[in-house]
Amino acid sequence: MSARITVATTAFADQKPGTSGLRKKVRVFQQPNYLENFVQSIFDATSGLPHSGTDKTLVVGGDGRYYNNEALQTIIKMAIANGFTRIIAGQNGLLSTPAASCLIRKFQAFGGIILSASHNPGGPDADFGIKFNGANGGPATEDLTAAIYQQSLDIEQYHQHDCADIDLERIGSQQLQACVVEVVDPVTDYAHLMEQLFDFQRIREMLTSGSFRMHFDAMNAITGPYARSILEQSLGAPPGSVLRGIPMTDFGGGHPDPNLAHAVDLQQRLTGSEAADFGAASDGDGDRNMILGANFYVTPSDSLAILAANATLVPGYRAGLAGVARSMPTSQAVDRVAASLDIPCFETPTGWKFFGNLLDAGKITLCGEESFGTGSDHVREKDGLWAVLFWLNIIAVRGESVAEIVQQHWLRYGRDYYTRHDYEAVESAAAQSLVDSLRQRLASMSGRVFGNYEVELADDFAYTDPVDGSRSKQQGVRILMRGGARIVYRLSGTGTEGATLRVYIEDHQTDPAKQGADPQIALAELIALASEIAAIEKHTGRSLPDVVT
Ligand code: G16
């Protein structure tokens, strides 16, 4: 027997989504009704939105972290009770974020619910997250996010289909009342899309030539099955090219965060005289990427600029780019490429959701962020493996090393030295007072000279979406120096403990003789200035950042 039941509930005050959905400790989500309240709030806030076709379809899946499958059972049963007539679920509850976006678009779904806390650790004492993506396959807009939050404050009841757990192991369809639940292979549709964009034949020739060695670190997270299928089985990279390829609920105890601090084995394989030619890593849910060459690290900001500059070498982008976009704290490297290609370049607030309208309106083809995110109009999420395949395609065509490609790029456009300093788990009030104090002093900063730098403009970044006119304020304090150097301060919207202060620092160097320095040295004066201007130690008690990227 099965039936629709309605359960009385009371609101939680803390369900305000951050940069990308609601992220909390697993134990917070495990409180009675906590997950249910948020899911019902999503359904209530979106109930008036149109859906195409006869079915009201929801795509569901997650990165496989602890609590993924329990949460999925709840979500599917609630979706049935809330009138969805078709649910597409990744087998064993798995879907990478870009693959979920791909499925939403392919099956013209109403939207999707993706379970992930991205690069945050997993396990019973670690993090969990949930986000809603709309019919375009992209993260909920600011307005919709606000509406979901408002519902979560007003909620009094939720609806659930009362039935046994759904079998998510077996591929195929199950009829539950008026709803069909389809369990699909998480990789197939995504892999097919990649084949349409990239020159698989050319990449295959390179990977099977014996003279090109690569490693991909899946960090025991979602991209393991995708990378094994695409890189090893389809493109012929030798077995073992994919490292840590088995998804685990706690990611093997590590942080599934693709940066040098958390991909130590990969980095070692890309270091020294025996270094492999190409290395890459992706994060918990498969949307981030890190790119390495032999003894060479590519910053995400440079990676975006280089993909843009070389896009026409890749079949899916052969016709050229309509435009590009980057989040405000991302370096200005891609702006220079856009200027040279004579295409528009948009500067958006941090958060992939801000690219959605630009992509939907055809104003941009590529976009990216300093936080290891790059993507295009092929889906509406950033996409880790896509970026890896893009790089492999470029290398296969150009026949040059990663270092050669980047250094030639710098010769032509100059090098945008870039670093981000993170101060983690800072007391929230202290972090807020630092930002407030900066805001109060913005007006007096213009024209001030600090050492070799003169402030041209200091402001709190605000963005007007050129498509729907919506306005987003207070998106980060910018101190723009004459000549293009910048210091940016903002508080992260993805942490689950206290506040994380992010300080982004960059400067442009056109002299080829000065393009080979360590960014921490090249930017030393600006780094010191950034600390001084914001009085970081006074506010936070920290004299050094916890993480430097
Ligand atoms: C999310 C967002 C990105 C953002 C990143 C960092 O990525 O989708 O747009 O750049 O968080 O945000 P913050 O600086 O606020 O922590 P992900 O990969 O965590 O979903």
Image (spheres, helix red, strand yellow):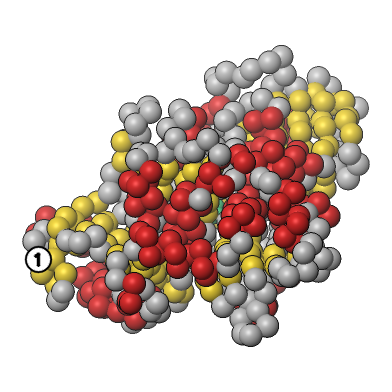
Q: Secondary structure at mark 1?
A: loop
Instruction: Report the label total.
Output: 1
Q: Position of residue 487 (x, y in %)?
A: 28, 64
**Could you tell me if residue 447 is visible in this image?**
yes
Q: Position of residue 413 (x, y in %)?
A: 35, 59
Residue at figure coordinates x 52%, y 70% from the top left: 403
Q: Nearer the viewer, residue 232 or 177?
A: 232
Q: Nearer the viewer, residue 277 or 159?
A: 277
Q: Is the residue at mark 1 in contact range of ligand 1, meaning its CB lies under 8 Å from it? A: no
Residue at figure coordinates x 38%, y 43% from the top left: 341
Above or below 410: residue 91: above
Q: Nearer the viewer, residue 86 or 404?
A: 404
Q: Position of residue 175 (x, y in %)?
A: 87, 25
Q: Quadrant of residue 235?
A: bottom right
Residue at figure coordinates x 78%, y 69% from the top left: 210
Residue at figure coordinates x 28%, y 44% from the top left: 462
Residue 61 falls left or right of residue 362: right
Mark 1, residues whose alpha carbon is within 10 Å: few (<14), some, or many (≥20)? few
Q: Quadrant of residue 137?
A: top right
Q: Hey, which residue is sitting farthest top in the picture?
A: 54
Q: Quadrant of residue 448?
A: bottom left
Residue 330 falls left or right of residue 192: left
Q: Amino acid at mark 1?
A: Arg
Q: Hey, which residue is sitting farthest bottom in the picture?
A: 273
**Could you tell me if residue 348 is visible in this image?**
no
State which quarter of the image contains the N terminus: top right
Residue marked by disc 1: 448
Above or below 22: residue 331: below
Q: Position of residue 500 (x, y in %)?
A: 42, 65
Above or below 465: residue 434: below
Q: Nearer the viewer, residue 17 or 343?
A: 343
